[in-house]
């Protein structure tokens, strides 16, 4: 149901965190290209939306709701995922009342009767996982949510929530890229493999810094240079090599790309033709860590 893979080949998903609420025409144009490429998993959150009169809260969800109204075929058959649990100024709130209200708000803004995939955006340290689980299970059993995902959780936090849930946690979303390899060593990807849980990776291009020319940290600079070396030998865009690094992990991992330009989308799609050797993959890990593997 979550459309994270097809015919054994790992997919790309499309994230809309860079959009503003008023970019309807641009979103329709870009989503048309994204759907034509075969991507049918869209990711947002109730806090996405840029700056505006309402500080952007709910902006991208309203944007997708308007896309659904104007061009319904663009979202037909697609999985729409959103996230709740961040409250401006708090910052995290997974209380029953807040999550239920947040889900209702998302449903209204997205113009959906059921959210395909609902994530807890970040763990709330002041709500017991049993209480979070009970609320999430109630949203599933009521038909308002199709599947539950965890986002930015440690392995212990994931296990604690999963322990109390009746509905399974279907996906774990985390930051993972050639410039952020912590999930390789902190147990999150190992846990996903142990339990057969698909992973979605946010910021797989490190916010565009891996394939751009912006000033970066020393670690990002090392990774960018390594990616450029591999891309040059393979005749591939740097973005495709960076995405191939993420997708090669056996978890499996689906990168969330967020480009708003057709040219960069075409570069990202070349990942399907980009094959990294084991040596190249490990050399990228070493570049990020700044040391040889033991």
Image (cartoon, rainbow, N blue to C red):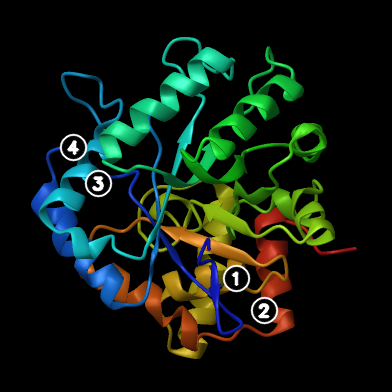
Q: CA distance from mark 2 to mark 1?
A: 14 Å
Tell me the tag on residue 21: 4
The C terminus appears in which quarter of the rendering? bottom right
Q: Taking 125 as reference, is 16 left or right?
A: left
Which marked residue is nearer to the observer: mark 2 or mark 1? Answer: 1
| Element assignment for label 4 | loop
Residue where numbered disc 2 is placed = 280
Callout in the foreground (1, 4): 4
On screen, residue 97 versus residue 55, left or right, reads right
List the residue tagged with mark 3: 64
Frontmost residue, 210 versus 49 = 49
Mark 3 or 1: in front is 3
**Which numbered disc, 4 or 3, marks the residue that appears first in the sequence?**
4
Q: Residue at x 62, y 38 (%)?
A: 152
* Disc 1 packing (10 Å; few <14; some 14–19; many ≥20): many
Residues tagged 3 and 1 counted as in contact (Cβ below 8 A): no
Which residue was labeled with disc 1?
247
Q: Which of marks 4 and 1 precedes in the sequence?
A: 4
Relative horizontal placement of residue 102, taking residue 184 as reference (left or right): left
User: Does the rendering let one see residue 183?
Assistant: yes
Q: Are marks 4 and 2 in contact (CB under 8 Å)?
A: no
Cα distance, mark 4 to mark 2?
A: 40 Å
- From this view, report whether residue 214 is shown above or below residue 281: above
Identify the mark nearer the N-term, 3 or 2: 3
Residue 49 position by quadrant: top left
> Mark 2 packing: few (<14 Cα in 10 Å), some, or many (20+)?
some
């Amino acid at each position: 149901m979550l459309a994270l893979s097809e015919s054994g080949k790992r997919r790309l998903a499309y994230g809309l965190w860079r959009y503003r609420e008023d970019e309807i025409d641009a979103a329709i144009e870009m989503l048309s290209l994204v759907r034509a490429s075969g991507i049918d998993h869209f990711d947002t959150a109730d806090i996405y939306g840029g700056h505006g009169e309402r500080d952007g809260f709910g902006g991208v969800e309203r944007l997708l709701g308007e896309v659904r109204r104007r061009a319904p075929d663009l979202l037909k058959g697609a999985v729409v995922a959103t996230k709740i649990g961040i409250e401006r100024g708090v910052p995290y709130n997974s209380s029953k009342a807040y999550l239920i209200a947040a889900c209702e708000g998302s449903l209204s803004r997205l113009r959906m009767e059921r959210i395909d995939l609902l994530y807890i955006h970040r763990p709330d340290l002041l709500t017991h996982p049993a209480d979070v689980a009970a609320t999430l299970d109630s949203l599933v059993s009521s038909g308002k949510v199709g599947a539950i995902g965890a986002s930015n959780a440690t392995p212990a936090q994931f296990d604690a929530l999963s322990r109390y849930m009746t509905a399974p946690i279907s996906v774990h979303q985390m930051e993972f890229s050639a410039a952020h390899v912590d999930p390789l060593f902190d147990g999150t990807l190992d846990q996903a493999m142990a339990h057969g849980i698909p992973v979605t990776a946010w910021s797989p291009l490190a916010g565009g810094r891996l394939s751009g020319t912006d000033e970066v940290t020393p670690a990002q600079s090392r990774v960018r240079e390594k990616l450029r070396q591999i891309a040059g030998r393979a005749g591939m865009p740097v973005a495709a090599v960076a995405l191939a690094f993420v997708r090669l992990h056996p978890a499996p991992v689906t990168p969330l790309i967020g480009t708003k330009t057709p040219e960069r989308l075409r570069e990202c799609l070349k990942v399907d033709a980009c094959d990294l050797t084991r040596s190249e993959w490990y050399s990228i890990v070493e570049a990020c860590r700044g040391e040889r593997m033991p």
